[in-house]
């Protein structure tokens, strides 16, 4: 009987132990499933973080390229600004130098013609060039292109100054009033203004040795008046020959030539 009871107790213990193990096993399985879910979630988070990190690295690379390109662009802009600033400084210096030259030229001409009436010869700077305006009554007889003996002295003194400045060109312009002219020597005011300019150029070249390659003769007829032609005083002022002393054009264009801009 004792033996039977022992067997029975043992059987009961085995059953109880088996039930306990099953419960424990089920609990462990649930914990394992939760850990698997957690691991899966962590793996997803890790994958997302890796993707985000790669995207950030790509963006950082792009920003590095952009920053490098931007830095190069800024550097080129600063170089261009420096070149432009140097060009402006150089141009300003040359303009001041040119203005000083014009002032010295005007003073030399006025000093050399100090004995000539100011009504007959006017010297001034306009548009950066020197104008010497000689009245018609000093240079020519009425309706003629032949230079008077009194004018020779004026042109001789002008030639001395002009020859001292071989880097300048000379434009001689003839001007008339609006009174029509027609005689055996002149067809009209255009003809008269051109022939007067040519006579002045010829005397400067042939008698006073001004380089002919520096000279230009032009006729403006009555179309650039200084005064109103309605009065005799106005017509007298308009009858004139202007000797315009200018910088050589190639030097002038070089002066205005801007430096090359970096791409």
Image (spheres, grey):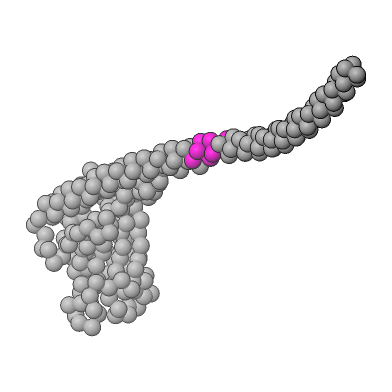
Name the residue located 82 percent from the left edge and 24 percent from the top edge. Answer: 13
Kindly give the residue lying farthest to the left in the view shown: 115
Q: Which residue range is magenta in the image? A: 61-70
Inspect this view and state whether residue 163 appears. no
Kindly give the residue lying farthest to the bottom in the view shown: 230
In depth, the one of 55 and 187 nearer the eye is: 55
Q: Quadrant of residue 1?
A: top right
In depth, the one of 127 and 191 nearer the eye is: 127
Is 4 on the left-hand or right-hand side of 220? Answer: right
Name the residue located 35 percent from the left edge and 62 percent from the top edge. Answer: 218
What percent of the width, then of the height, locates residue 76?
45, 39
In depth, the one of 35 and 185 nearer the eye is: 35
The relative height of residue 130 versus residue 226 in the rendered view (above or below) is above
Name the residue located 81 percent from the left edge and 28 percent from the top edge. Answer: 16
What percent of the width, then of the height, locates residue 128?
27, 55
What percent of the width, then of the height, locates residue 43?
69, 34
The relative height of residue 103 versus residue 219 in the rendered view (above or below) is above
Is 150 on the left-hand or right-hand side of 1? Answer: left
Q: Quadrant of residue 217?
A: bottom left
What percent of the width, then of the height, locates residue 116?
11, 59
Instruction: Please tell me whether the stretch drawn in magenta is mainly helix, strand or loop.
Output: helix
């Amino acid at each position: 009987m004792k033996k039977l009871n022992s067997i029975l107790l043992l059987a009961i213990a085995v059953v109880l132990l088996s039930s306990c193990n099953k419960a424990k096993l089920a609990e462990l399985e649930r914990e394992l499933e939760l850990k698997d879910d957690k691991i899966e979630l962590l793996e997803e988070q890790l994958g997302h973080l890796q993707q985000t990190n790669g995207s950030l690295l790509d963006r950082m690379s792009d920003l590095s390229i952009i920053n490098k390109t931007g830095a190069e662009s800024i550097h080129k802009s600063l170089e261009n600004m420096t070149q432009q600033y140097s060009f402006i400084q150089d141009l300003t210096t040359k303009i001041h130098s040119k203005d000083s030259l014009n002032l010295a030229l005007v003073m030399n001409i006025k000093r050399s013609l100090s004995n000539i009436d100011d009504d007959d010869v006017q010297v001034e700077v306009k548009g950066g060039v020197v104008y010497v305006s000689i009245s018609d009554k000093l240079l020519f007889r009425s309706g003629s292109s032949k230079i008077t003996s009194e004018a020779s002295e004026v042109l001789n003194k002008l030639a001395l100054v002009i020859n001292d400045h071989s880097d300048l060109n000379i434009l001689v312009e003839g001007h008339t009033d609006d009174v029509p002219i027609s005689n055996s020597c002149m067809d009209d005011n255009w003809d008269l203004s051109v022939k007067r300019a040519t006579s002045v150029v010829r005397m400067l070249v042939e008698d006073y040795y001004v380089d002919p390659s520096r000279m230009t003769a032009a006729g403006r007829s009555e179309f650039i008046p200084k005064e109103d032609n309605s009065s005799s005083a106005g017509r007298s002022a308009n009858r004139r020959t202007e000797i315009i002393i200018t910088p050589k054009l190639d030097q002038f264009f070089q002066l205005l030539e801007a430096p090359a801009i970096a791409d």
